[in-house]
Image: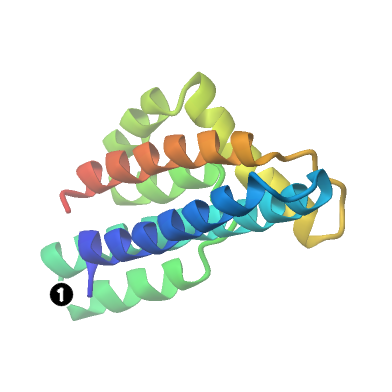
């Protein structure tokens, strides 16, 4: 599976996780809800990284030779901390106009969702405190799906 199909698979799996936890969150105590919200934050951040990497790799598959594909695959294999700045840098490496377009798209609550998920994920991974809730991470996830869709459009996949 490649490109949009892989992104769809990742999204479907994450949507299912949100649904399972939503049911649990209704009956679990506040600490358990908080634990699951942190878990979802890590998953959403990983989804953003993997989805963007897959979309730019699919662009390379469709528009370049095997050497370009290998190069993009190697570079995106280590694509981490996909905050707004890193996303713009990655897309700008393909085309300066993509960076400008993405920068215009990543405003206000959309930029906040991307940067917050990455920042919270880093804090969680390094043992820091996190005030994330199920409701907040659900909202961030919806905005991040819009970012992934927009980047797919820029990449033409």
Front-most of 17 and 57?
Answer: 17
Front-most of 110 and 88?
Answer: 110
Q: In which quarter of the image is residue 59?
A: bottom left
Q: Is mark 1 on a helix, strand or loop?
A: loop
Q: State left or right for residue 1 relative to residue 106.
A: left
| Residue 20 % position (x, y) | 52, 58
Identified at 72% across, 40% down, the residue is 132
Identified at 71% across, 52% down, the residue is 38
Identified at 40% across, 64% down, the residue is 13
Front-most of 77 and 145?
Answer: 145
Q: Mark 1 points at which residue?
A: 65
Going by the picture, which residue comes out furthest to the top?
108
Going by the picture, which residue comes out furthest to the front?
27
Going by the picture, which residue comes out furthest to the right?
128
Front-most of 61 and 39?
Answer: 39
Residue 112 visible from this viewpoint: yes
Depicted 75 relative to depicted 66: above or below: above
Total number of numbered discs in the rendering: 1
| Residue 82 % position (x, y) | 54, 50
């Amino acid at each position: 599976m490649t490109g949009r199909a892989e992104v769809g698979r990742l999204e479907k799996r994450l949507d299912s996780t949100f649904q399972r936890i939503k049911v649990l969150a209704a009956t679990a105590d506040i600490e358990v809800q908080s634990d699951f919200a942190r878990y979802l934050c890590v998953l959403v951040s990983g989804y953003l990284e993997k989805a963007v990497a897959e979309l730019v790799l699919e662009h390379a598959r469709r528009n370049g030779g095997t050497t370009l594909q290998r190069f993009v695959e190697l570079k995106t294999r280590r694509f981490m901390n996909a905050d707004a700045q890193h996303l713009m840098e990655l897309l700008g490496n393909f085309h300066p106009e993509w960076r400008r377009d993405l920068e215009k798209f990543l405003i206000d609550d959309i930029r906040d969702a991307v940067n917050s998920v990455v920042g919270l994920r880093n804090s969680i991974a390094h043992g820091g405190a996190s005030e994330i809730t199920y409701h907040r991470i659900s909202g961030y996830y919806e905005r991040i799906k819009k970012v992934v869709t927009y980047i797919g459009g820029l990449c033409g996949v």
